[in-house]
Structure formats: structure tokens, C-alpha cells
Image (tube, grey):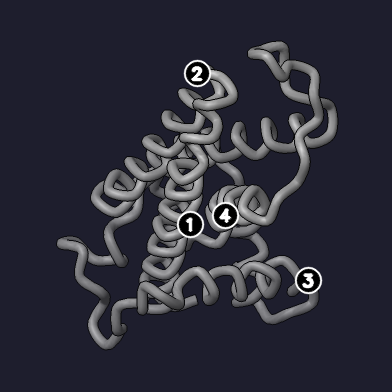
């Protein structure tokens, strides 16, 4: 993969993660009032999750480095795991509905898919994020796209990134360039 392709791909992934975080944060904000009606603890959890996910967007876009990426992965992984726990085992021992298994709804699934995609999209980031521990905005200092590379369209970035992920994961017998994508997909530094 050329430097130009990596920087453009990094911009796509960066903006995709930002859009996905904003979507899941706004969904959590939208359902916060009904959770406050159930119990103040549930409402507080959704309010904090919404604030963290919406607040993550400017942090990610301004300082796209390993620490910020790991924070997003850890936070969204925890929310996805809690979602699965409350749908399969039941709500942990907190509040008036402790132990009850929650139903699955369309809005729940939209938020959870967005959060899971944030975790998975990390693996689609160019190797500059993996190797140096930090990435520049769009691959060049100052946050401008690399010469000859247009900036990604904000409305389409999540579709492009999600379309990239299966390709990266399913290219076992591909060219060396595709094998490099697979290495990026499997590499998880801590």
C-alpha cells in the first residue's frame, strides 16, 4: 500500500469511527429520559455513555493517537459487552430491574452495531497508527489530505469503511498488498 493510499484510508477510518461514535452517543442521549424514568442509575449510565461517545469525536479528530484509539476501543467494548450481558443473562445487580433480561430493539441494535464497528474499524487503520503509536490527521501534518487525495465525504465514510473490513478479513490468498491489510487487521498492540 502506498503512502498516499494509507493516508487516504486512515482519513476514511478516522472519520468513520467519529461518525459511528456520534451515532451511538446520540442514540444513548435519545433513550436517556426513558431510562431515568426506570431508575436514576440507568439514566445516569446512558447520560455518561452519551457524553463519552459524543465527546470522543473531537478528541479523535484533533489527536488521533494510540491512547485515544485505545480509549475508544475499551469504552465501546465495555458497552457492547454490557449490552450482550443484559440481553442474555440479565441486568447486573443494580436498580429495580436487576436480574431481568432486556428485550432486543432496533435502536439498541443500531447503537451496538455502531459501537462494535468502532472496535473493528480500529483494525482497518493504516499501519502508521500501529507502528508509531500515533497517526497524523489524514496522513500529513496540519490535518490536510495528502496531495491528490480528496477528503472523504462524511455521509459515505462509514459505508466505505464497513465495506473495507470484510475485504481485509477475507484476503488470505491475495497479493502482498492485500496480505498487508490482513496483517493490519490482525495486529492489536497494547
Q: Is any atom of residue 190 visible in this view?
A: no
Q: Which of marks 4 and 3 is nearer the N terminus?
A: 4
Q: Which of marks 3 and 2 is in front?
A: 2
Identify the residue position indicated by label 1 in the image.
20
* Number of numbered tags placed on the structure image: 4
Q: Which of marks 4 and 2 is nearer the N terminus?
A: 2
The Cα–Cα distance between marks 3 and 1, rounded to whole angstroms, is 28 Å
Residue 180 drawn at (x, y percent):
61, 68
Residue that protrudes farthest toward the left in the picture:
142
The Cα–Cα distance between marks 3 and 2, rounded to whole angstroms, is 49 Å
The quadrant in which residue 106 appears is bottom right
Identify the residue position indicated by label 3 in the image.
172
The answer to whether the residue labelled 4 contacts the one labelled 3, judged by CB atoms less than 8 Å apart, is no
The Cα–Cα distance between marks 4 and 3, rounded to whole angstroms, is 26 Å
Q: Earlier in the sequence, mark 3 or mark 1?
A: 1
Q: In terms of secondary structure, where does tag 1 sit?
A: helix
Q: Is residue 8 left or right of residue 102?
A: left
Identify the residue position indicated by label 2 in the image.
40
Residue 128 drawn at (x, y percent):
41, 57
Which residue lies at the image location 15% right of the left edge and 62% below the top edge?
Answer: 142
Amino acid at each position: 500500500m502506498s503512502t498516499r493510499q494509507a493516508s487516504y484510508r486512515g482519513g476514511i477510518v478516522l472519520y468513520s469511527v467519529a461518525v459511528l461514535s456520534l451515532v451511538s452517543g446520540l442514540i444513548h442521549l435519545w433513550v436517556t429520559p426513558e431510562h431515568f424514568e426506570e431508575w436514576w442509575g440507568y439514566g445516569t449510565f446512558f447520560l455518561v455513555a452519551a457524553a463519552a461517545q459524543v465527546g470522543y469525536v473531537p478528541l479523535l479528530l484533533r489527536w488521533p493517537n494510540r491512547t485515544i484509539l485505545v480509549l475508544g476501543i475499551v469504552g465501546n467494548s465495555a458497552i457492547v459487552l454490557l449490552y450482550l450481558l443484559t440481553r442474555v443473562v440479565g441486568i447486573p445487580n443494580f436498580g429495580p430491574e436487576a436480574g431481568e433480561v432486556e428485550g432486543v430493539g432496533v435502536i439498541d441494535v443500531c447503537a451496538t452495531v455502531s459501537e462494535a464497528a468502532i472496535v473493528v474499524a480500529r483494525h482497518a487503520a493504516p499501519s502508521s497508527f500501529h507502528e508509531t503509536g500515533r497517526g497524523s490527521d489524514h496522513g500529513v501534518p496540519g490535518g490536510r489530505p495528502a496531495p491528490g487525495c480528496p477528503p472523504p465525504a462524511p455521509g459515505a465514510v462509514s459505508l466505505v469503511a464497513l465495506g473495507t473490513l470484510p475485504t481485509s478479513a477475507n484476503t488470505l490468498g491475495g497479493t502482498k498488498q492485500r496480505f498487508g491489510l490482513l496483517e493490519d487487521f490482525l495486529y492489536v498492540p497494547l
